[in-house]
Image: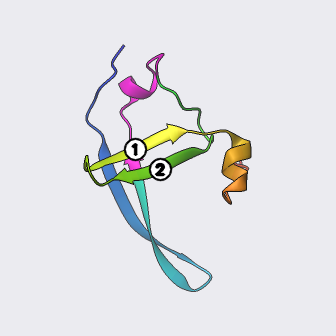
Amino acid sequence: MARTGVGTIIGRKTASKGKEYARVWVYIPTKVSEDTAFPFKIGAPCMVKIDETKEQLVIKPISEKEATELGWRKRVRRE
């Protein structure tokens, strides 16, 4: 499988309760997300951090309990 690939930063504006917000997504290539080493599940919380010294965005999985303590809410997807 592939452990590296070129992703894309995707952005758009959205409106909620009369205010406009910028939303940003990071596209992860399918070949990376399907790798057996991929540490995330769809809908699971993660910690996002900017490492200024390395000029990197660091994303790591965290537990739902830890995320809830930090103000995260589990979203229920409508089908």
Which residue: 71% across, 43% down?
Answer: 64
Considering every residue shown, the one lying at the far top of the view is 1
- Dot 1 surroundings within 10 Å: few (below 14), some, or many (20 or more)? few
Which residue: 67% across, 39% down?
Answer: 63
Of the image marks 2 and 1, the number of the one nearer the N terminus: 2
Residue 75 is situated, as x and y percent measured from the top left of the image, at 70, 52
The amino acid type found where label 1 is placed reads Val
Q: According to the image, label 2 marks what residue? A: 48
Can you say whether 61 is above or below 13 in the image?
above
Residue 44 left/right relative to 21: right
Look at the image and give the residue range highlighted in magenta.
26-37
Residue 39 is situated, as x and y percent measured from the top left of the image, at 52, 27
Considering every residue shown, the one lying at the far bottom of the view is 18
Q: According to the image, label 1 marks what residue? A: 58
Q: Is residue 20 magenta?
A: no
Q: Is residue 29 magenta?
A: yes
SS type, badge 2:
strand
Can you say whether 37 is above or below 40 in the image?
above
Q: CA distance from mark 2 to mark 1?
A: 6 Å
**Contact between labelled residues 1 and 2, with CB atoms less than 8 Å apart:** yes
- Dot 2 surroundings within 10 Å: few (below 14), some, or many (20 or more)? few
Which residue: 29% across, 55% down?
Answer: 52
Whether residue 41 is visible, yes or no, is: yes
Residue 41 left/right relative to 4: right
Residue 1 is situated, as x and y percent measured from the top left of the image, at 36, 13
Front one among 5 and 13: 5
Can you say whether 54 is above or below 10 in the image?
above
The amino acid type found where label 2 is placed reads Val
